[in-house]
Image (cartoon, grey):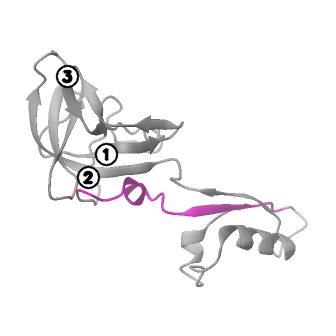
Amino acid sequence: MKLSMKWLADYTDVSDINIKDYCDGMTMSGSKVEGFEVLGEDIENVVVAKVTAMEKHPDSDHLLICSVDIGKEEPVQIVTGAQNVKPGCLVPAALHDSYLPGGVHIKAGKLRGVPSNGMLCSFTELGLTQNDLPGAYADGIWILNDEDCKPGDDINLVLGNDDTVVEFEITNNRPDC
């Protein structure tokens, strides 16, 4: 059985409890904990960005230079090859020094001589599948316009990855659990 600590917090105050101590305490009380997973721990420094302007890359037929609002004073320039992005779209942006699932590290750099301060992300690059997002466009950047978010929001909060899930071993002889 899996237990969301966010759900548990609706019923009792667990804000000051260390997850390891919680798991050890539950195991010692007779409810064996198999393990726990911190959702979104492999996604860092990825935010919601609003594409404010786009132009064709001067040295490429398929690359686009995007100016994106990430909730800061200055917009950020990101080069992308995705053709489904338009001005006004809300998209996930992995900024300089970001991490994505699988240990992918995103740094600022240049694409064909043009500075790019991150990467616009598809849902697969965030570790999601078509089963997680049935109505999402499978090819290209994930467009977040239907989500309740704004530029600068942490993508883990948008995805609901701000939780820890504890897995208990529940056997047939423990109806009290």
Q: Quadrant of residue 5?
A: bottom right
Does the image show residue 30? no
Q: CA separation, marks 3 and 1?
A: 24 Å
Quarter of the image that includes the N terminus? bottom right
Pointer 3 and pointer 1: residues touching (CB < 8 Å)? no
Q: State left or right for residue 79 relative to residue 133.
A: left
Residue visible at 10% across and 19% down in the picture: 58
Amino acid found under the numbered disc labelled 3 = Gly
Q: Report the residue marked by disc 2.
A: 146
Element marked by disc 2: loop
Q: CA separation, marks 1 and 2?
A: 13 Å
| In magenta segment, residue 161 | yes
The image position of residue 152, as x and y in percent, is: 27, 57
Amino acid found under the numbered disc labelled 1 = Pro
Q: Is residue 155 above or below residue 176?
A: above
Within 10 Å of the Cα at label 3, are there few (<14), some (14-19), or many (20+) other Cα atoms?
A: few
Q: State left or right for residue 93 relative to residue 53.
A: right
Residue visible at 40% across and 60% down in the picture: 157
